Amino acid sequence: MAFPHNSLRAFLTHAKKSLSTAIQSSQKVTIVAGNESADLDSLTSSVLYSYIRSLAPPSGAFTPLYVPLLNILAADIGLRPEFGAVFRHANIEASHLVTLDDLLKGNEIALKPENTKFILVDHNSIQGELGRIFAARVQGVVDHHEDERKIGSETSPEPRVIEKCGSCTSLIVRTLKSSWESSAGGSSLVSGAADAQGDSVENDASVTRSWDAQVAKMALASILVDTANLTAEGKVEKADIDAVRYLEAKINLSPKNTAQWDRTKFYEGIDAAKRDIDALSFEDILRKDYKQWTENGLNLGIASVVKPLQFLAEKSIESTSDEKEEQFVSEIGDFMAARSLTILAVMTTFTSSSGEFQRELYVQALSAGHAAAKVFAELAKVELKLEDHDVALLPKKAVATQPSSEGPWYVSLHSSQSCISITPNAQDVLT
């Protein structure tokens, strides 16, 4: 039975309770999982897919309810200040989200694989502990990264959509918008639900449009952030433009938004929140948007940061009175050691004081990863149009050209071009 048309808050509350019941009673459950970095696009992709699919489940669905999974522990939500900004627009709270904590019983994942189906969004290869247990249970994917060929061609009744796009959420809008439209004429729980959430009930259409506008704002947030409000050359695709147009139409249909909607102001608010990481520790900044995997016997990690390397370098010396270049390398080394990493790449994106988009890359490797790291750095120079870069409090590039066979190897690269078109998946380049 489809979930009645209701608010996002009501849907998430129901999904969380239903997951708990399914675990306790060994019932079937369909999980829509974002990637391990759990960035804004992964959040909105999993929630939007689950919400629309639950309103209008396809024939042959494993279960009529789809549960969105934020692929981190609940305690790590606080590392993502942009989430709070989006929550306010969508009328939800962090406590409504399903996280890895909700899958656990003690320290073990309590879901039985045979009772599950997984749909992946914003990645197409399930990693970590979830991958070890549930890889064979993946039946569907919507993603905008390089196809890793881990998911077969037959995923019916779920989609298999893997194509280049600025935001994965845009692909989900395109894939499921017909289902969203068809659900508009379905059953709803308007009066009681509206009263419970503080919404006034003028008529059913008014309230449901308000709910749809909240969902649309949530989805729009990640598309605008990932495409710099549709201005990022080489990244914006037709699906992004179409999705923004469609979601803005949803927002403008709501009587609450018609007179006050301002897309640029909305984007700037979310983007500013995302970049507000000054209060985070050096380690937490790296953890905020982090992915890890193993390939060819090497443990690899990528951390994406929304501030320049200079900011990170200054963070690395906050806890010490020494302003030494070795401190940054040491802090990175500690981060790597805690995760048994062979290679760590730190990718930064930010806007300069003159308004230019800039990108930096820092790579550090243990001796076992020297060769792979050097290949990655050279490829990055070409593919990302980067050049050698010196940063105060970081080792100079001249040091990096002569690494000892046992010590860490590192290199800092930089691009000051106004926009970069990223052709390869960084994971593919590293391996």
Image (tube, grey):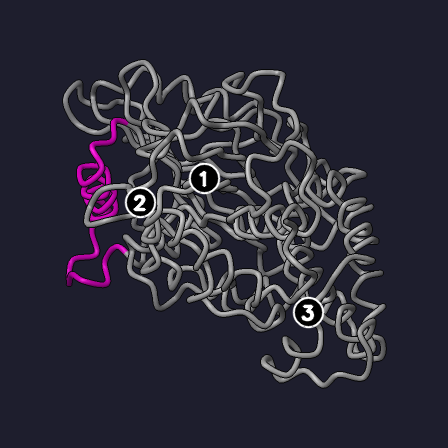
Q: Residues within 10 Å of mark 1 (few under 14, many from 20)?
A: many
User: What's the CA distance linking mark 3 and mark 2?
Assistant: 58 Å
Looking at the image, residue 377 lies above or below residue 287 = above
Tell me the mark number nearer the camera, choosing from 1 and 2. Answer: 1
Tell me the mark number nearer the camera, choosing from 3 and 2. Answer: 3
Q: Would residue 140 be counted in the magenta stretch?
A: no
Looking at the image, residue 182 lies above or below residue 130 = below
User: What's the CA distance linking mark 3 and mark 1?
Assistant: 25 Å
Mark positioned earlier in the residue sequence (1 or 2): 1
Foreground residue, 392 or 187? 187
- The image quarter containing residue 213 is bottom right
Q: Which residue is mark 3?
A: 189
**Residue at horizontal 52%, vertical 28%?**
124
Q: Are marks 1 and 2 in contact (CB under 8 Å)?
A: no
Q: Are marks 3 and 1 in contact (CB under 8 Å)?
A: no
Label 1: element kind: loop
Mark positioned earlier in the residue sequence (3 or 1): 1
Q: Position of residue 42 (x, y in %)?
A: 53, 46
Q: Which residue is mark 2?
A: 394
- The image quarter containing residue 127 is top left
**Residue at horizontal 63%, vertical 60%?**
218
Foreground residue, 205 or 160? 205
Q: Which residue is mark 1?
A: 28
